[in-house]
Amino acid sequence: MKHIVILISGRGSNMEAIVKACAAEGWPARIAAVISNRPDAAGLQFAAAHGVPTAVVDHKAFPDRESFDAELAKVIDGFAPDLVVLAGFMRILTPGFTRHYEGRMLNIHPSLLPAFPGLHTHERAIEAGCRFAGATVHFVTAELDHGPMVAQAVVPVLDGDDAGALAGRVLKLEHRMYPAAVRWFVSGQIAVEGSRVRQLAGESQSFS
């Protein structure tokens, strides 16, 4: 039985999708904890209501990123995770933290990486005239929004789209794609080969 720890900063809608999928699909895993850097994160209430242990490591209580990450890692490791999942966790992580969880930490980013790392991805895609946008699940490395890509979801950018409308369509696919990627990991169905990730069971790594 694999242990999954999920990090959130707000509502954590992808966390919700993962918790529900884990229970409904009978993964060989359990959600060991949901941890937030914000005491008021709405997702903590959802997790507690579903019987998932929760914890808060408030970044405002620490003088620098390194000390926060050290305490966060201590709390995470208390749950003995096989996989750490970033689900709307709005903190830039230090290289030491990412090295500690190398090969066992996933993130979802709302763009078709390597395009548009960082913030305001949907606005940037529209401003650039992209005809397609989407999201990417990837292993976390020290370089922001990089790392071997596990899966990507693609939606068209429609005439008249604003960032909110585009984000809404992308998010619906994120809620399918991220649980699938986590399930692949805990089931041993993905292999990292250099910079590429291969799905060993023949499932598509593209969502649309």
Image (tube, rainbow, N blue to C red):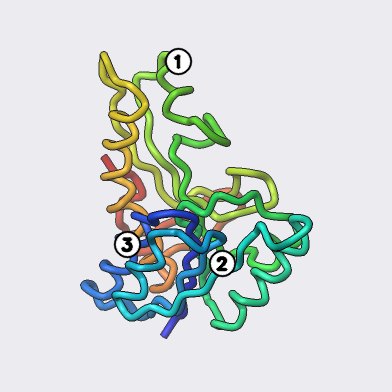
- Distance CA(mark 1)–CA(mark 2): 34 Å
User: Whole-percent x and y of residue 25?
Assistant: 23, 72
Gap between marks 2 and 3, in whole Å? 20 Å
- Which label sits in the foreground, 1 or 2? 1
Q: Which residue is drawn at 39% across and 56% down?
A: 12
Hey, which quadrant is residue 65 in on the image? bottom right
- Secondary element under disc 3, as helix, strand or loop, is helix
Give, as a three-letter code, the residue at label 3: Glu
Q: Residues within 10 Å of mark 1 (few under 14, many from 20)?
A: few
Relative height, residue 137 to residue 191 (above, below) = above
Q: In which quarter of the image is residue 192?
A: bottom right
200 or 17, which is in the foreground? Answer: 17
Find residue 79 and report its horizontal and vertical position in percent. 54, 82
Above or below: residue 93 compared with residue 133: below
Across the whole image, how many numbered discs are drawn on residues?
3
Judge by depth and name the residue closer to the eye, 165 or 24: 165
Q: Reading the chain from its start, which is encountered first: label 1 or label 2?
A: 2
Residue 117 percent coordinates (x, y) = 56, 35
**Which of label 2 and label 3 is nearer to you?**
3
Q: In this rendering, would 199 be left or right of 66?
A: left
Give me the disc on residue 127. 1
Type of amino acid under label 1? Glu
Dot 2 or dot 3: first in sequence order is 3
Q: Name the residue under label 2.
A: 104
Amino acid marked by disc 2: Arg
Disc 3 to disc 1, C-alpha distance: 31 Å
Q: How crowded is mark 3: few (under 14 residues within 10 Å), some or many (20 or more)?
A: some
> What residue would you read off at disc 3?
16
Towards the viewer: 66 or 41 = 41
Residue at figure coordinates x 29%, y 37% from the top left? 168
**Dot 1: element:** helix
Tell me if label 1 and label 2 are in contact, CB under 8 Å: no
